[in-house]
Image (cartoon, rainbow, N blue to C red):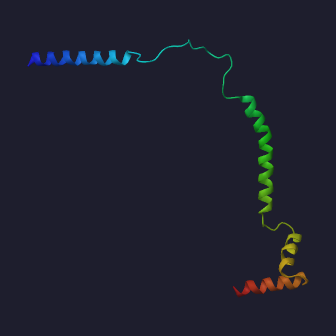
């Protein structure tokens, strides 16, 4: 039994050596030149990113404000109410329009 264990250990050791030897061979590759460390980093280009940020940030912010204001339907001043109601009730006085709104709300 002991001789079988020694034989197994020997075969396993030879197998591992063969694997290491096979993986260490270079194959079809050829070194054509030595690598060098670049003087300046290739990326990230910080100056470009800073300039793009300074240009694009105000454009995005201004666009956001315009879009948000365009789709804002909230009432902020009495003039807003008059402009909204003039679309539906042209020519009627504001007291009549308020009366219609109140009576409609009481029915619900």
Q: Residue at point 22% right, 19% down?
A: 12
> Is residue 33 shown left or right of residue 100?
left
The single residue placed furthest to the front in the displayed view is: 28
Q: Is residue 68 above or below residue 82?
A: above
> Is 108 or 30 nearer to us in this picture?
30
> Is residue 88 shown left or right of residue 48?
right
> Is 15 or 85 nearer to us in this picture?
15
Residue 79, percent from left and from top: 89, 70
Residue 106, percent from left and from top: 73, 86
Q: Residue at point 86% right, 68% down?
A: 77
Q: Is residue 44 above or below residue 75?
A: above
Q: Residue at point 86% right, 70% down?
A: 80
Residue 87, percent from left and from top: 85, 77
Q: Residue at point 74% right, 83% down?
A: 105
Report how many numbered discs are placed on residues in the image.
Answer: 0
> Is 34 or 78 nearer to us in this picture?
34
């Amino acid at each position: 039994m002991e001789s079988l264990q020694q034989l197994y250990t020997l075969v396993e050791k030879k197998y591992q050596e063969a694997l290491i030897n096979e993986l260490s061979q270079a194959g079809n590759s050829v070194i054509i030149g030595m690598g060098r460390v670049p003087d300046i980093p290739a990326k990230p280009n910080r100056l470009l990113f800073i300039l793009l940020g300074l240009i694009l940030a105000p454009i995005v912010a201004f666009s956001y404000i315009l879009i948000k204001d365009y789709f804002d339907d909230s009432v902020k001043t009495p003039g807003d109410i008059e402009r909204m109601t003039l679309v539906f009730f042209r020519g009627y006085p504001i007291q009549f329009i308020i009366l219609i709104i109140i009576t409609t709300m009481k029915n619900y």
